[in-house]
Every structure is written in structure tokens, then in C-alpha cells.
Image (spheres, rainbow, N blue to C red):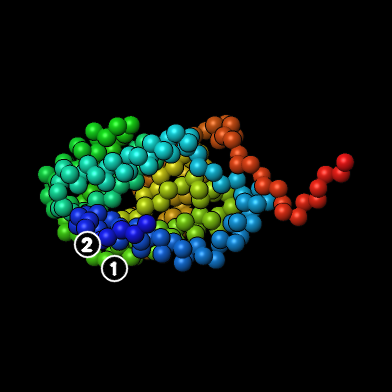
Amino acid sequence: MTMNLARTTGAARTGLVRALIAASAISGVLGGCVAVMGGAMVSGSMMAVDRRTTGTQVDDQTIELRASTEVPAAIGERGNVSFTSYNRVLLLTGEVPTEADRAKAEAAAAKIENVRAVLNELAVMPNVSINQITADSITTGKVKAAFVDTPTLQVASIKVVTDRGTVFLMGRLTEAEAAQATQVARSVGGVKKVVKIFEIITPAELAAMPLPPTAMPASAPAAKK
């Protein structure tokens, strides 16, 4: 699908730029890990699963989509707002020109169906430069790569958002995992601050979560009759 940038609003256009840069940056940072991750998934040794239910994942996608329409409708093309929903908690990041716009953005987000809470991290300031957007995207990729390199962390269970050097971490983690993820993120170059937005679960809750199916190796011999 091709999107015409000229026909998008200012906020949507900047948001799309953020997404494209993030995809490129993360692909470059994690490129060397793809084969290893793929092999681990096939062997079943990497139990990386999204810890939300399927229904919650769909709700989060719907919340982000509705926010990208309803918040700009409330504040117009002023500012640049990004939306990240995890387990129905909606995080607002980016920039708006006035405190009034910041309040309007939060109010519009709070009215979206299925949103349990809104975390308003919008800054009242001019929009950041493309260079800053690029730097944030690279930082996100580096943090994810650091999680991949940490065997006791499941990168698929942690959502990473970077805004002006501040890294926001979202996910359903145990206390031990949350502490380790925070420490790892803080050690990454370019990270100015780490904000934890974790839902803490117990080891028992984690153990009760279903594991992904183990794929059968392609070279496995057929069963004898």
C-alpha cells in the first residue's frame, strides 16, 4: 500500500516519518540478529510471546488507530503526537504548542473506547527536528537489540518507545524482569532517562502463560509404520 504524504495532515505526516525511520533504524540495528532469532524460534528454545491476550492486542491496535484520528480532530494540525497502547493503557508522546492543546489531547484520548488509562507525556514545545526523530528511532533499535542480547529477557514482551532521548518501557513483567529491563535500557548509549510503565505479574502468573508451539524441524524423519 502506498500513502500519499502530501494528502496527510502535519501531525500524521510527522508520525509517518517517525514510523518509517523507526522501521529502517530497527531493521539496521537488529539485522544481524534475524537469522539467530529465526533459528531459535524454530528450535523452540526462544519462548518469546506477547503476554497480552489476542483480544487485548486487537483492542490496543484499535485504540492506537482511533487515537490517531480523534486526537488530531481535537487539536487540529498543531503539534506532533504519537500514540502507543499496551494492555489498554494509552501513552501520548511528542510535542504540542500550548498547555490547552496538551489537555485537549488527553481528554480526547480518555474518551476512546476500552482505554483504561492515559499517560500524558506530551511536552509543550516546538516540534522536534527530523534529526531528533532519527536519533530516537536509533535508540529504540539499540534498546531492543540489547534486550535480544539478554537471555533472561523476552524482547517480544517489552514495548519500547523513545521520545527526545527518554525511553518508555511497557509490558507485563515480573519484578525481576522489570528491574533487569530497566538496567539494560539505562546502559544503552543515547538514553537520557528510562520511564517504567510496567504491569507487574507474579512468577506464578508467568508460568501459567501458554508457550508458543514448537515447530518440527524440516529434516525430521517420517514416523515408521
Q: Is residue 189 left or right of residue 39?
A: left
Residue 112 sits in which quadrant? Answer: top left
| Residue shown at the point (49%, 59%) measured from the top left | 145
> 136 and 19: which one is in front?
19
Q: Is residue 160 left or right of residue 126?
A: right
Mark 1 or mark 2: which comes first in sequence?
Answer: 2
| Count of numbered labels shown in the rendering | 2
- Residue tagged 1: 131
Name the quarter where the N terminus is drawn. Answer: bottom left
Camera sees residue 165: no
| Residue shown at the point (32%, 43%) measured from the top left | 64
Judged from the image, the secondary structure of the residue bearing numbered disc 2 is: helix
- Residue tagged 2: 6
Vertically, is 5 above or below 102?
A: below
Residue at far front of view: 1
Q: Position of residue 84 (x, y in %)?
A: 34, 46
User: Residue 218: which numbered mark, if any?
Assistant: none
Vertically, is 27 above or below 77?
A: below
Q: Position of residue 162 (x, y in %)?
A: 35, 55
| Residue shown at the point (35%, 39%) measured from the top left | 62
Name the quarter where the C terminus is drawn. Answer: top right
Tell me the amino acid under the disc marked 2: Ala
Q: Is residue 36 left or right of residue 27?
A: right
Q: Which mark's residue is nearer the viewer, 1 or 2?
A: 2
- Give the crowd class for mark 2: few <14, some 14-19, many >=20 residues within 10 Å: few
Judged from the image, the secondary structure of the residue bearing numbered disc 1 is: helix
Tell me the amino acid under the disc marked 1: Asn
> 137 and 220: which one is in front?
220
Real-space CA distance between mark 1 and mark 2, rounded to the nearest whole angstrom: 21 Å
